[in-house]
């Protein structure tokens, strides 16, 4: 390879058109998944303090927002229910109720906007009074008892019309069990997006504010089931197991601090691989931008492009609607 001065890397960067021609990765609206929060009631919107620009919406308002998302070309939404504290219990039993908030939201969304993909978490934390993702006995999160509850939760959500079930709980063996349970119920076309490598991260704080599981969780944490942030090889084992158990797509979470994991997973398994730009990542970009320390539009687009470069096929981002609008106006 010739070296400088024959080779000048800056030659291709001289003009905007040349930079566009030589750009290896790009972000399109097809890459976006919008995570959103649904609350009970009518015509209600609540700001989430730690997530500037994010609102919990009652179903009627969520339907309007979802229509806009679809019209902008966003392929899918990930819907999270905010459950009133009085309806939570130790085992999160409301998760199994086909008339619960998330199931009603899914039914309404699919009825009004059938061509918009709907993703639901499979995990008990929005419903448990202790904020844990599973069933707790004597201070331990029980793996196999939790899986049984997750199977039922996945099925009622699927029966409500959810297209993609996304287990976010990190119990061992849940992907295979949920796949089997769905198949037994004749729901073999429902996709499974595994939160395959999900870390015990402090970047989830604002999300736990948004769904009200933070107070419930208190001083407790999720380190006995979510992964240790120091581990990379372990993520490959987690992903391999979930693929083996029947996951159709896998996710890495959080996103930006774990781009190495994303890259390794995508290059090893070549599966549809998604990244979650989690609440804390969103909050830091937005908070610094509010102070004038960062340019929100620029850093958001750059960080989403970085996910693409690192191998993501799609990104869950709370900024999806804004980003889709920007992508549409840049055309
Ligand atoms: C629930 C769940 C969490 C997130 C998505 N699903 C929180 C957690 O595991 O405690 C986090 C999303 C975010 O921070 O944006 N299992």
Image (tube, rainbow, N blue to C red):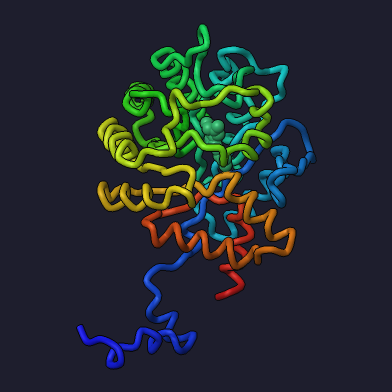
From the viewer's perspective, is residue 93 above or below residue 75?
above
Relative placement, left or right, of 157 versus 273 is: right
Report x, y in % for residue 272: 34, 49
Q: Quadrant of residue 144?
A: top left
Relative placement, left or right, of 269 versus 85 is: left
Identified at 50% across, 59% down, the residue is 304
Quadrant where the image shows the C terminus:
bottom right
Quadrant where the image shows the N terminus:
bottom left
* 202, 263: nearer the viewer: 202
Identified at 49% across, 44% down, the residue is 254
Q: Dividing the image into four quarters, tell me where ligand 1 lies.
A: top right
Identified at 50% across, 40% down, the residue is 119
Can see residue 249?
Answer: yes
Relative placement, left or right, of 272 versus 169 is: left
Taking the view exactly as shown, the residue that stands out farthest to the right is 43
* 229, 226: nearer the viewer: 229
Report x, y in % for residue 162: 50, 36
Taking the view exactly as shown, the residue that stands out farthest to the bottom is 6
Can see residue 110?
Answer: no
From the viewer's perspective, is residue 9 above or below residue 181?
below
From the viewer's perspective, is residue 137 above or below residue 234?
above
Q: Quadrant of residue 320?
A: bottom right
* 108, 7: nearer the viewer: 7
């Amino acid at each position: 390879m010739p070296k400088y001065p024959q080779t000048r890397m800056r030659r291709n960067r001289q003009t905007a058109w040349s930079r566009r021609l030589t750009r290896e990765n790009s972000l399109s609206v097809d890459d976006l998944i919008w995570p959103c929060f649904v609350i009970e009631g009518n015509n209600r919107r609540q700001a989430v303090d730690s997530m500037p620009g994010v609102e919990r919406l009652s179903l009627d308002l969520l339907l309007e927002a979802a229509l806009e998302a679809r019209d902008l070309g966003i392929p899918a939404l990930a819907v999270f229910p905010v459950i009133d504290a009085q309806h939570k219990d130790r085992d999160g039993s409301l998760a199994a109720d086909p008339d619960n908030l998330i199931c009603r939201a899914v039914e309404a969304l699919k009825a009004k906007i059938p061509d918009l993909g709907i993703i639901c978490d499979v995990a008990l934390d929005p419903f448990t009074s202790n904020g844990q993702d599973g069933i707790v006995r004597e201070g331990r999160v029980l793996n196999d008892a939790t899986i049984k509850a997750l199977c039922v939760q996945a099925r009622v959500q699927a029966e409500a019309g959810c297209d993609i079930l996304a287990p976010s709980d990190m119990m061992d063996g849940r992907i295979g069990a949920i796949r089997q349970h769905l198949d037994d119920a004749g729901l073999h076309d429902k996709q499974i997006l595994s939160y395959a490598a999900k870390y015990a991260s402090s970047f989830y704080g604002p999300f736990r504010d948004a769904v009200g599981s933070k107070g419930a969780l208190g001083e407790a944490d999720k380190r006995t089931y979510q992964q240790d942030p120091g581990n990379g090889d372990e993520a490959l084992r987690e992903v391999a197991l979930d693929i083996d158990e029947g996951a159709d797509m896998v996710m890495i979470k959080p996103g930006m601090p774990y781009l190495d994991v994303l890259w390794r997973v995508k290059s090893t398994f070549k599966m549809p691989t998604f990244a979650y730009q989690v609440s804390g990542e969103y909050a830091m970009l937005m908070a610094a931008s509010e102070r004038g320390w960062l340019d929100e539009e620029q850093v958001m687009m750059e960080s989403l492009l970085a996910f693409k470069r690192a191998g993501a096929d799609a990104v869950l981002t709370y900024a999806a609607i804004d980003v889709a609008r920007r992508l549409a106006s840049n055309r």
